[in-house]
Amino acid sequence: MSKVKSANLGYPRIGEKREWKKALEHYWAGKITKEDFLETVKTLRLSYLKKQKDLGLDLIPVGDFSLYDHVLDTAVLFGLVPERFRTDEKEVSLETYFSIARGSKNAEASEMTKWFNTNYHYIVPEISNDTKPYLTSNRLVALFNEAKEAFGITTKPVIVGPITLLKLAKGYDQDHFQTLLTALIPLYVQVLSELKAAGAEWVQIDEPILVKEQTAEDLVLFQDTYQTIKNGVPNLNLLLQTYFEAVDDYEKVVQLPVDGIGLDFVYGKEANLAAIKTFGFPKEKVLAAGVIDGRNVWKTDLSAAFQELKTLLGFTGGNDKLWVTASSSLLHVPVTVSNESELDPVLANALSFADEKITEIVTLVNGLNKGESAIETELDKNSDDLLALQQSAHRNNNEVQEELSQLGEELPARPGSYRLRQQIQTDAFKLPPLPTTTIGSFPQTTEVRQARRNWRKGDWTEEQYEQFVNDETAKWIQIQEDLGIDVLVHGEFERNDMVEYFGEKLAGFAFTRFGWVQSYGSRCVKPPLIFGDVSWIAPMTVRESAYAQSLTQKPVKGMLTGPVTIYNWSFVRNDISQADVFNQIALALRKEVHALEEANIRMIQVDEPALREGLPLKDEKKADYLHDAVYSFRLATSFVNNDTQIHTHMCYSEFNEIIDTIDALDTDVISIEAARSHGEIISTFEDFAYKKGIGLGVYDIHSPRIPSVAEMKSYAERALKVLDPKVVWINPDCGLKTRRIEETIPALKNMVEAAHEVRKEL
Ligand code: GLN
Ligand code: ZN
């Protein structure tokens, strides 16, 4: 009898205890030899394969493992090495590979950017108009053979497809796209033919670009490209894999000349399901159905998924035409729940990381192949676990739910218009024109981090730690006074991370021990879990802010992280809507804002650096997201008196799409990362005729370089060409926690000097 199969699209690289990260960093630091490094990562790679095999997975990926990033791997496979890193060797050495990713003594690293709407960053391939791609060494064949030799398994190699690769690359002109693609296709054919020769049966080609808006021409391009590839390797099965959303043009996509189509039935569920019901699914093709959430950490409702799969099975040409997968690579979730012994069992039992997700896939496949009764025990346990969390006190905070239900449709609004507030605040604060300020954090030195560790370990008492934070704060208030900065900050010395800090003080959050995911390169993040109803317990920032304010006559900004950023940088419960979670966080922050106002903190900054990155991939979903973001931000901030000044901060440089949203936040002042792309940003604000307070960063804090007075002056002058001097502030791009003191003080000194000089010209 033909069987449904279980498949994985990609497995996390980092290891249960971040062994991969450690190996990389040891190697970079010269602590281990190249041979030892390669041996260590090989052992890890094989252990991941073994684990997937032991979990009972039918189709195990290879090529998903990377020493840095899979997009870089693909670029390097085709010799797409930026000019400044090119050598005359045909192979791209490990040294060159890491230099592209991390920069070298003589050359700047390639840019990295977010992989679609995830928090994973890939290395942007750099291709010029006359780049001639060529095949370096076929790493996929090596990886395929390695798995075969070690475990006798026929794996499914994974590669980023040519169209996604080129569309994500930069440095060439659009009219060269076709030429470059034409040059790449035969190389793909060669890679695939060699895989076929080595014994591969299926290859997964990732073309996530298909979930973005596609024109008719784009689809012709796909048709032609895959026809050529197919003709080149007629006997190899190709799975065209999409994820993160529904495909844009289902009807055409499923007709492309490949042997299987992978669709996301979690993040693109509605549209993909509707499309399959309307247009059916080609009987000769495999449907890889991504019904397990590859990006979030909760157990799947297995009974629901089982029913859904049975529905999907009805559209395929038979059991052997269905694969069960996660909605995307499991790169985006931590490795395993099994090490989380310290979590509340009600929560732990409802979690599913990569290994557990694979088990879920295998379970569903067993059910489909052997009948539902074969997985009855699993289904029962699954629904018990999910129900237990659902019924727990964590998710049934009546007070929060009551407050939430009282919220009206109308956007919360400040008592006075911006114009009125501006007048009142100008009189109240008596700031000079072009006031200077910073974004919040000051250098998190080794001492600061050591102090926190001492306190966490219990070596220091609460009082000792508080005293330390106070002393740092006092030191930096004095430094800011001496520098002549107009609006001060307390420095955020008590914060490890701008989300974790609040998560630890609010109800509804939990923290794992090993729940790391790769962010970029060896850098991993451990997002908090928002698993219950979020609520405010006690003041979180008032003590630090009030202390700082007590030391100076100048205004000190209270400093909070906004609801949307807290949401976007956490793993979030999915049993209630995004808007409801935004608003729960906002209601909690509102109490903090209130407490700050009561403590006579007159300026409050609510940071939303991650607002833009949560923007949905599909245009039609953007408006709702932005509305909900604005609503929650205003819920947290707009009730304050007219003479309380609300600030926000964002740190990225593409504002075109969200300029109306920025305006709708109705903050009195926004500070924005701008130094790296000043011209572009200014025109956005100019076109919009932005009228409210705005600080366009005059200094790029990502670099240790100390910008000169002249440079910062020129940024300020540029801003003044289009903005009313009454609304312009002078500030760095972002917080300074990653900078050293020796870099920070002189840079701020120059910044203040620049502001003084520009003021004279007003
Ligand atoms: N207030 C925060 C800081 O200065 C803002 C950080 C950010 O925008 N990412 O560190
Ligand atoms: Zn920032």
Image (cartoon, rainbow, N blue to C red):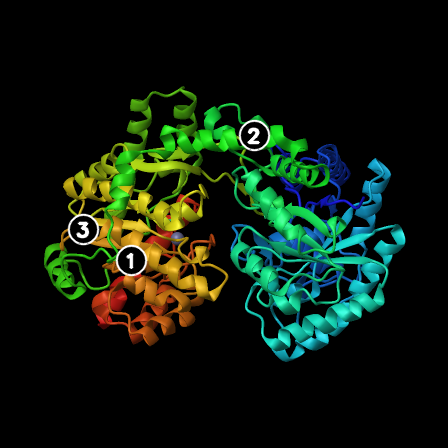
* Marked residue nearer the N-terminal end (2 or 1): 2
Q: For residue 752, which numbered disc appears in the image?
A: 1
Query: Residue drawn 77% across and 38% down?
Result: 35
Where residue 251 sits in the image (x, y, percent)?
Answer: 63, 68
Which quadrant of the structure image shows residue 109? Answer: bottom right
Q: Nearer the viewer, residue 502 or 123?
A: 502
> In screen coordinates, is 109 left or right of 286?
left
Q: Secondary structure at mark 2?
A: helix
Q: Secondary structure at mark 3?
A: loop
Q: For residue 76, which numbered disc appears in the image?
A: none
Query: Could you tell me which quadrant the N terminus lies in?
Result: top right
Q: CA distance from mark 3 to mark 1?
A: 33 Å
* Marked residue nearer the N-terminal end (2 or 3): 2
Residue of label 3: 639
Q: Can you see residue 343? A: no
Q: CA distance from mark 2 to mark 3?
A: 47 Å
Instruction: Tell which tag, 2 or 3, sits nearer the viewer.
Output: 2
Q: Nearer the viewer, residue 451 or 571?
A: 571
Q: How many marks?
A: 3
Query: Residue drawn 85% across and 38% down?
Result: 152
Relative to 405, residue 677 above or below: below
Q: Can you see residue 179? A: yes
User: Which class describes the residues within 10 Å of circle 3: few (<14), some (14-19), or many (20+)?
Assistant: some
Q: Nearer the viewer, residue 301 or 527?
A: 301
Q: Is mark 2 within 8 Å of ligand 1?
A: no
> In screen coordinates, is 747 left or right of 71?
left
Q: CA distance from mark 2 to mark 1?
A: 65 Å
